[in-house]
Amino acid sequence: MIYLYEIILLITLLKSIVLARKFSLSSQNYLFVYLLITFLIELSSWIIILIKKDWSFQYTLYCIFCIAFFWFYYAQSFQKKLRKKFHFVSGLSSLSVLLFSFFSKEEIGSLLIIALPIFYIVFSIFWFYQKIALPSESKITNDPNFWISTGLLLWSCFFIFRVVPRDFFNIEDQPFLELLREFLYAINCVMYLLFFKALIEYETIAKNIKK
């Protein structure tokens, strides 16, 4: 399943590259940057395995990048008043993570792994709230952010279920833990297929603007 996930990620990245060359990075709200960094992280993980190193710092940096990227990504789509609330909640959440890491014995990397899906859920809920509060004439499925938000929500909910009880399952039921790991790759596949759909919608919007 991991190979299927990486193939779908690569195809989505290639679609993003084509779209960026045809129009611009801004035409897809710089989603290419996220996809490229994600692909490089996956590639670096294979290299680390091959050289037999037990490094995990790249995931800590990746979590920080993902939070910062989607903070920027979603902020662009909010109305002024909601954007202020969005920045306040996101900033307060970031401060909470930093303070918790300072006063607790947990490493920042472990906290970020839990914090990342929570940030994703908050970001997505803000977007859905604005979409419901300020409905437009076009279908919600024509909005690329619908597919991005749906993908992030789906991934986040399962990731929390996968990560939070992992120590318990590692002791009590390792086969089930392995099943969850494989299922997470399936969720990753679905998420990046949704991202691919978002890129198609970005392309449609860019073509309509260019007419």
Image: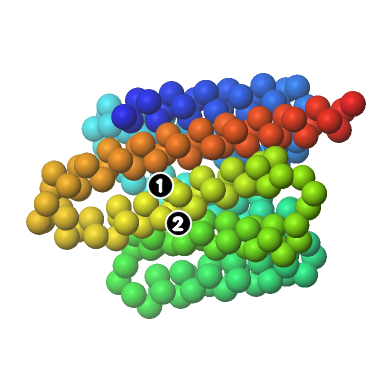
- The answer to which of 203 and 9 lies nearer the viewer is 203
| Local secondary structure at mark 1 | helix
Horizontal relation, residue 176 to residue 105: left or right = left
List the single residue furthest toward the bottom: 103
Instruction: For the C terminus, give its image quadrant.
Output: top right
- Disc nearer the start of the sequence (2/1): 1
Residue type, numbered disc 1: Tyr
Q: Which residue is mark 1?
A: 59
Query: How many callouts does the rendering have?
Result: 2
Q: Nearer the viewer, residue 143 or 113?
A: 143
| Residue 26: x %, y % from top left | 75, 38
- Using the rendered view, name the quadrant where residue 148 is placed: top right
Residue 30 found in image quarter: top right
Residue at point 37% right, 26% down?
Answer: 4
Q: CA distance from mark 2 to mark 1?
A: 14 Å
How far across and how far down the image is residue 41, in percent? Answer: 44, 36
Q: Residues within 10 Å of mark 2 (few under 14, many from 20)?
A: many
Q: Quadrant of the N terminus?
A: top left
Q: Is residue 87 left or right of residue 103?
A: right
> Disc 2, disc 1: CB below 8 Å?
no
**Residue highlighted by disc 2:** 117
Q: Amino acid at mark 2?
A: Pro
Between 167 and 184, the residue placed more toward the observer is 184
Colour mapping: rainbow
Q: Residue at x 67, y 21 (%)?
A: 18
> Which numbered circle lies on residue 112?
none
Please give left or right for residue 179 compared with residue 114 in the image. Answer: left
Residue 108, above or below 65:
below
- Nearer to us: label 2 or label 1: 2
Q: Residue at x 57, y 50 (%)?
A: 149
Q: Quadrant of residue 161?
A: bottom left
Up-down relation of residue 84 to residue 49 (above or below): below
